[in-house]
Amino acid sequence: MISYAPAELKRFPRLLHPKLVSLIVALREDGRPNAMPAAWVMPVSVEPPLLVVAVSPRRYTYDLLQQNPGFTVNPVPFEMKEVVEYLGSVSGKEEDKLARTGLKLLPPLAGKTPCIEGALACIECSVWAQYPGGDHYLVVGRVKAARVREDVWTGAIYDVSKAKPLLHLGGDHYTTV
């Protein structure tokens, strides 16, 4: 067994990976969408339907969520890996990242924030609560609507052989099933 000294504990999140990668879409001040990749996303309640995403307050997306409390969570397939890497390397403050990727957007079902076409699913949320969590904030979203790509879902689960979800291993390392 390998042990980690206290100085190495910053690497502990990798012990909980791989994690499904989602694109978090929030609206900019001018109404255009911005997206950031996130792997720290999970459901936290069925009734009411809630999920949580960890967002650093240093990220532009965090600022956007303070201004406009609507967002979407879009889990993506492995084929979107290069787009995810790009979106995670550039700030939306400096450029319209989505416009540069060529990703197409789907209109929202219940709010104002669009979904990413080609994502495995889209979960539309409004900010329900926020809690400080060290160097991130835990943004709790109340789920307002959801849609899935029918070609990769069987009942309420992914057909992973078709979906091939993008899984984050840590740093710039990814895999799929």
Image (cartoon, rainbow, N blue to C red):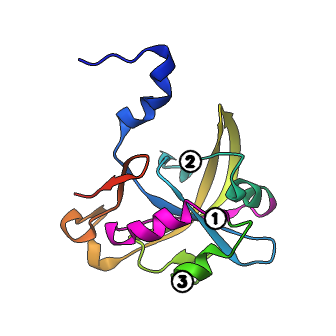
Residue placed furthest toward the left: 161
Residue 59 in the image: state x and y as whole percent.
Answer: 68, 53
Query: Mark 1 belongs to which amino acid?
Result: Phe
Q: CA distance from mark 1 to mark 3?
A: 13 Å
Q: Which residue is under mark 2?
A: 52
Q: Quick one: 128 or 46, which is closer to the camera?
A: 128
Residue 81 inside the magenta-drawn segment: yes
Q: Which residue is under mark 1?
A: 71
**Left/right of residue 147 with respect to residue 1 in the rendered view:** right
Q: Quick one: 76 or 8, which is closer to the camera?
A: 8
Q: Which mark is residue 148?
A: none
Q: CA distance from mark 2 to mark 3?
A: 22 Å
Q: Quadrant of the N terminus?
A: top left
**Left/right of residue 79 with respect to residue 104 in the rendered view:** left
Query: Mark 2 belongs to which amino acid?
Result: Val
- Residue occupying the point 56% across, 47% down: 52
Residue 73 in the image: state x and y as whole percent.
Answer: 53, 63
Q: Residues within 10 Å of mark 3 (few under 14, many from 20)?
A: few
Query: Mark 3 belongs to which amino acid?
Result: Leu
**Left/right of residue 160 with respect to residue 138 in the rendered view:** left
Identify the element where label 3 is drawn. Answer: strand
Which region is colored magenta?
A: 67-91
Identify the element where label 1 is drawn. Answer: strand
- Sooner in the amino-acid sequence: mark 2 or mark 3: 2
Residue 4 in the image: state x and y as whole percent.
Answer: 39, 18
Q: Which residue is under mark 3?
A: 106
